[in-house]
């Protein structure tokens, strides 16, 4: 009985394989045929394969990879399929040039008082060396802010981003209180005027802002959709900020592109306040082998704010440059 | 036992009013319509003083409304709240008023359920505190909203994961139950007022009493049903109130922040709430006793018993506060250390923290706990101070924690670092207090402040609490 079964199974398997083969052959044949017929009007681009050969392939349809039209509201809630955005900050390169802040404020039309991007002067222990610590939204995988939102105005997308829909936000500020990274800011007064009409608002652009709602760093989701780096990354003169995609395993600061996993392993990348269990998608590379003295960054702080840093700087006369 | 002896001594020596009170004999022996007559004049003709009160209080409330309108038009930039201290005294007020509502929820419902006869004259004051503080308190969380125009989103887009949604559900439920209970305990008094033939009030008010009395005639069946309704509401309200206040505490407890992230917060808030409700209750009893000459109804013994309760609550509260801070302090984590240091720094919160401990823990225990200073007046003054102390506590829960985030505050305008309330917030706070008093002032013109029918009904005492299958068990 059992033998019989096995034999008939084998027979079925062979038959099925043959059928499948035929279908596949036919499929590829027709695919090839359609490729051949389109050959004339398709633009070609050269790409490098993993084994080092240069091959020529059809130029992909732009709108297929990066949509040519702004996303629909549902799409802005869902996220970009197949993406897993990640941010890496190389603390050894940050010199508090504050260009990321300026770039961000300009790009998102923020008031001068409102900073989505902040740069803190940190010192981990009494003997530790102070270092500049850029902080954007960490886009947690277990975001405390999203949990507490009573109306779903802030939400987590499949591409890792945590965004705010300011047309839904009721301004309860519970998310601001819940965020352990002090990322979120509130539009206390009327935001500065912008040319962008209100109808063009999308949670991905976050412009125009609305009074009485919460806003924060959005990893420039609209730029990410078009394959462009965020404003902060593009503005950083030190190349300290990297943005990329975990699925592609690549992050870029605009001038160099690194393998994300390799970078994190090689440089002992960590996530800020890992112990809170928020599982951020932003990684920090420790400030070792510095390229700048942290004191260089102090000159970019206005005179009246300097005294905030006294506690950290006092008694520190070493240089941490390599 | 010992405390009891001391207390009775005190009652005897206290000269404010009367006799060794024997509550069993106070009002019920008199003619059934006697007690209500005492209140009829004040219900019929409001005094000039009453109009003055209503005018002043309404003016304060109106100014609060003006402040609110300004806040809606100009945005929250005109409040003291900023990106770190995103909540301020609005939230403190919210927690504070919600806490006061415990007086009625726990005191009057426990009296009802446990058939405590001496407490009956206090029932209405307790329930009025509950309803008025809920009505005043709930809007304070709404003043925190940046977009009041989108308030309906709480229902149309509501998410059950959010502690705010829990609060919305719990507080509205609590409010509905408490208003129902307040009304049920009014029915018999409305019937009494309806049955006074020569009550000199406007016809619409007579009509109102007739409708609100629901054709209550005091038949045995009506009595039975009404009593059952009281019991059921009391049994529902106690757990509802505990749940509502625990959920309120989790508005903070569910956060990761040091100073909020604490497992003790649920019970701690419930204890604090009961404590503040009891303290306010004593103050309001004292005021009504003075104003309406109710020494026969609100007796020295009432103050005596509630003062004992107040000391007990003060000790409980002290114990909870100690547990809360000792566990934070013992193994100081970095952020907790910064937070706790603020409570000992006189340029920060040390003054408020010490005043709070003095008012809410030390003074009640010394002045009421020890025999030398006890009197009805001192108990009342201490109660008023406790209410203030517990407001300060709510402020100390909300603001210093928000000013102590995990990432040190650096990169921000200097005047945005610390919180202090603006005129708008103060105006709305005083408007809240005024509105609460206004509700009392108006409510005591609608029906007597003492639940007359309840007090006169001597049958309740013999009613069982639980129904047993076997007769006479």
Image (tube, coloured by chain):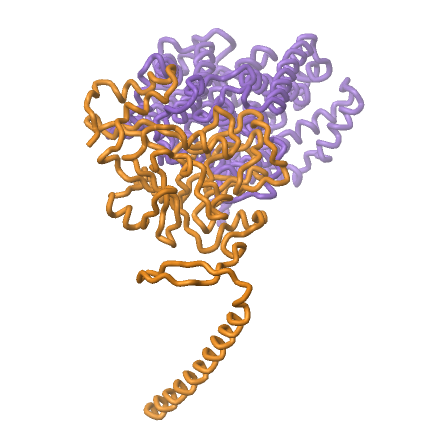
Chain colours: A orange, B purple
Looking at the picture, tell me which residue is in the foreground, B32 or A299: A299
Q: Quadrant of residue A131?
A: top left
Farthest residue, direction front: A40
Q: Residue at x 76, y 19 (%)?
A: B199
Q: Residue at x 24, y 43 (%)?
A: A268
Residue B218 shown left or right of residue B257 in the figure: right
Name the spot of residue B172 as percent of width and height, x first. Answer: 57, 36
Name the spot of residue B192 as percent of width and height, x first. Answer: 70, 26
Q: Residue at x 51, y 51 (%)?
A: A78
Farthest residue, direction top: B15
Name the spot of residue B412 as percent of width and height, x first. Answer: 42, 23
Looking at the picture, tell me which residue is in the foreground, A321 or B168: A321
Using the image, determine if residue A69 lies above or below residue B104: below
Can the viewer see residue B364 in this picture?
no
Can the viewer see residue B446 in this picture?
yes
Farthest residue, direction right: B203
Q: Quadrant of residue B442?
A: top right
Using the image, determine if residue B366 lies above or below residue B137: above
Residue A127 shown left or right of residue B110 in the figure: left
Residue B158 shown left or right of residue A293 in the figure: right
Q: Quadrant of the C terminus of chain A?
A: top left
């Amino acid at each position: 009985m059992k033998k019989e079964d096995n034999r008939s199974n084998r027979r079925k398997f062979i038959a099925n394989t043959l059928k499948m083969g035929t279908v596949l052959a036919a499929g590829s044949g027709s695919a090839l045929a359609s490729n051949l017929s389109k050959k004339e009007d398709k633009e070609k681009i050269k790409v490098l394969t993993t084994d080092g050969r240069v091959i020529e392939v059809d130029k992909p349809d732009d709108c297929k990879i990066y949509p040519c039209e702004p996303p629909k509201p549902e799409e802005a809630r869902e996220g970009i399929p197949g993406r897993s955005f990640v941010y890496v900050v190389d603390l050894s390169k940050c010199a508090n040039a504050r260009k990321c802040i300026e770039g961000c404020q300009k790009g998102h039309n923020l008031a001068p008082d409102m900073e989505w991007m902040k740069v803190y002067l940190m010192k981990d222990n009494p003997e530790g060396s102070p270092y500049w610590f850029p902080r954007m939204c960490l886009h947690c995988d277990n975001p405390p802010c999203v949990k507490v939102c009573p109306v779903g105005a802030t939400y987590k997308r499949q591409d890792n981003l945590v965004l705010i829909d300011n047309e839904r936000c009721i301004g309860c500020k519970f998310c601001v209180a819940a965020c352990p990274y002090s990322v979120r800011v509130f539009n206390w007064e009327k935001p500065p005027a912008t040319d962008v009409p209100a109808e063009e608002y999308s949670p991905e652009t976050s412009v125009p802002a609305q009074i009485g709602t919460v806003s924060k760093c959005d990893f420039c989701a609209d730029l990410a959709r078009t394959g462009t780096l965020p404003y902060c990354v593009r503005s950083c003169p030190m190349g300290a900020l990297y943005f990329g995609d975990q699925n592609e395993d690549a992050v870029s600061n605009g001038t160099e592109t690194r393998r994300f996993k390799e970078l994190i392993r090689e440089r002992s990348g960590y996530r800020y306040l890992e112990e809170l269990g928020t599982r951020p998608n932003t990684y920090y590379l420790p400030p070792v082998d510095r390229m700048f003295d942290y004191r260089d960054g102090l000159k970019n702080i206005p005179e009246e704010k300097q005294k905030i840093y006294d506690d950290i700087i006092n008694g520190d006369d070493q240089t941490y440059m390599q | 036992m010992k405390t009891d002896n001391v207390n009775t001594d005190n009652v005897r020596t206290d000269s404010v009013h009367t006799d060794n009170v024997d509550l069993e004999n106070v009002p019920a022996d008199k003619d059934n319509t006697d007690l209500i007559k005492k209140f009829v004049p004040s219900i019929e003709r409001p005094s000039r003083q009453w109009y003055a009160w209503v005018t002043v209080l309404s003016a304060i409330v109106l100014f609060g409304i003006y402040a609110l309108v300004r806040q809606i038009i100009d945005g929250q930039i005109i409040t003291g709240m900023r990106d770190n201290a995103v909540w301020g005294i609005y939230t403190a007020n919210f927690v504070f008023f919600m806490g006061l509502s415990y007086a009625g929820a726990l005191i009057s419902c426990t009296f009802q359920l446990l058939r405590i006869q001496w407490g009956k004259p206090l029932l209405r004051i307790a329930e009025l505190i509950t309803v008025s503080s809920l009505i005043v308190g709930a809007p304070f969380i709404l003043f925190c909203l940046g977009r009041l125009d989108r308030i309906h989103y709480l229902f149309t887009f509501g998410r059950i994961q959010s502690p705010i949604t829990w609060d919305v559900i719990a507080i509205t439920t609590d409010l509905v139950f408490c208003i129902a209970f307040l009304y049920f305990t009014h029915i018999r008094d409305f019937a009494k007022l309806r049955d006074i033939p020569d009550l000199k009030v406007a016809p619409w008010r007579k009509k109102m009493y007739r409708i609100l009395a629901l054709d209550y005639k005091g038949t045995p069946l009506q009595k039975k049903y009404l009593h059952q309704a009281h019991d059921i509401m009391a049994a529902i309200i106690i757990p509802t109130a505990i749940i509502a206040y625990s959920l309120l505490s989790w508005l903070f407890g569910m956060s990761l922040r040091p100073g909020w992230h604490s497992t003790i917060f649920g019970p701690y808030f419930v204890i604090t709430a009961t404590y503040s409700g009891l303290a306010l209750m004593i103050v309001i009893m004292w005021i009504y006793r003075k104003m309406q000459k109710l020494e026969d109804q609100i007796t020295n013994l009432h103050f005596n018993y509630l003062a004992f309760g107040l000391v007990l609550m003060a000790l409980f509260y002290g114990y909870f506060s100690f547990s809360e801070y000792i566990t934070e302090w013992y193994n100081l984590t970095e952020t907790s250390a910064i937070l706790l240091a603020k409570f000992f720094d006189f340029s920060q919160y040390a003054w408020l923290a010490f005043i709070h401990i003095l008012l809410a823990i030390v003074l009640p225990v010394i002045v009421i706990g020890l025999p030398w200073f006890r009197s009805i007046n001192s108990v009342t003054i201490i109660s008023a101070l406790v209410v203030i102390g517990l407001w300060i506590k709510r402020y100390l829960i909300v603001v210093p924690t928000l000013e102590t985030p995990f990432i040190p505050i650096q990169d921000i305008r200097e005047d945005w670092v610390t919180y202090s309330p603006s005129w708008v917030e103060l105006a709305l706070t005083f408007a809240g207090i005024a509105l609460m008093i206004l509700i009392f002032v108006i409510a005591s013109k609608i029906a007597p402040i003492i639940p007359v029918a309840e007090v006169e009904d001597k049958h309740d005492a013999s009613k069982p609490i639980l129904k047993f299958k076997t007769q006479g068990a």
